[in-house]
Image (cartoon, grey):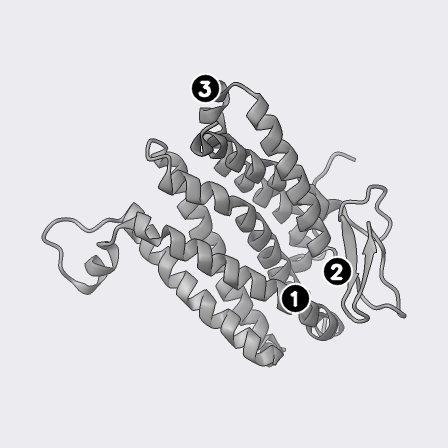
Amino acid sequence: MNINRIAARAFPAFAIGFALYYAPAYSFTGATSAFTWPLFTYFPAVDMWNWGLVPGNDTIGPPMWWYGWICAAILVGLVFAVISLLLPERAIQRALATLVWLVPICAFVFLLNWELPWFFPMWKPIWFS
Amino acid sequence: MITALLIIHGVLAVFLIGAITHQTLGVFWPRRPGQTDFVAKARGINPAGYVNAILVLYLLTFALGAFLYPTYRVYVRPPLQDLMLTYAIGLFEIKENFAAIGLALLPSYWYFWKKAPEFSTTRRFLVAIFFFMIWYNFIAGHLLNNVRGFA
């Protein structure tokens, strides 16, 4: 299979899968989250790595989940890329060319909903609950 | 060492800002024949010629930012929390999210610019997204760097 034909589907699908996972991962990760959104947790104060979601404490310091979110989102993006290669090329190429910019924009809006409390402490993220 | 890396991170971001701004101007406001003023010259570039530079600069800036992130988390963010400067933390949160999603968009950005000339709308949206993200991250980074002076 031509490398360009692979890239035409796999690259946009990767970006879409990444954004679709990353946005809720950031939004729903907390010390008491039911789902382990980050692949791992890094504790920079003690240079310690742990698999999955681990909350911080006074002994090991603050947790960093950003690396873990990115790695988990990369895996999801790769899954999306593989799935895209199994679908008919003509049918999805044009849709992917639109979704590749539309989904990240939607992800930014979704993320903004969960970032606003930093600026407006009274802001309650809008969510189905 | 960390300060030196932070300065390099900032310098790379300046190069990246320049490249994405030239490309954006070239895409959305191209120079018309006969225009020779300074701004027109900044717009009169081949936007596709900036793709590889933007890709490499983005990766380098991202990698350095990711390397510096733990220092921010341990030494910068806790004082911001103590000072109740939550808006500054929010600025950084948005910056990290833009940076991550931008990283995932890079392969598509390269593909649609280099290999798929028929998708001009996609190229324009991707350039606009990168332009917005990179400028935001640049400004937010500088605000954070100076935020203790505002407090």
Note whether A79 is above or below A115 in the view shown: above
Which residue, given by chain and number where applicable, does mark 2 sit on?
A64
> Disc 1 vs disc 2: Cβ atoms closer than 8 Å?
yes
* The C terminus of chain B sits in image quarter: bottom right
Q: Is mark 2 on a helix, strand or loop?
A: loop
Tell me the tag on residue B69. 1
Q: Which amino acid does label 3 sit on?
A: Arg
Q: Residue B121 location in percent, x, y?
A: 37, 35
> Disc 2 vs disc 3: Cβ atoms closer than 8 Å?
no
Horizontal side, residue B59 vs residue A33: left or right: left
Q: What element carries label 3?
A: helix
Q: Which amino acid does label 1 sit on?
A: Tyr
Q: Residue B94 location in percent, x, y?
A: 60, 56
Q: Residue B99 location in percent, x, y?
A: 56, 55
Residue B70 visible from this viewpoint: yes
> Disc 1 vs disc 3: Cβ atoms closer than 8 Å?
no
Q: What's the distance in space between the residues labelled 2 and 3, CA to CA?
A: 41 Å
Do dots 1 and 2 share one subunit?
no
Q: Is mark 1 on a helix, strand or loop?
A: helix
Q: Which residue is drawn at 32% across and 48% down?
A: B48
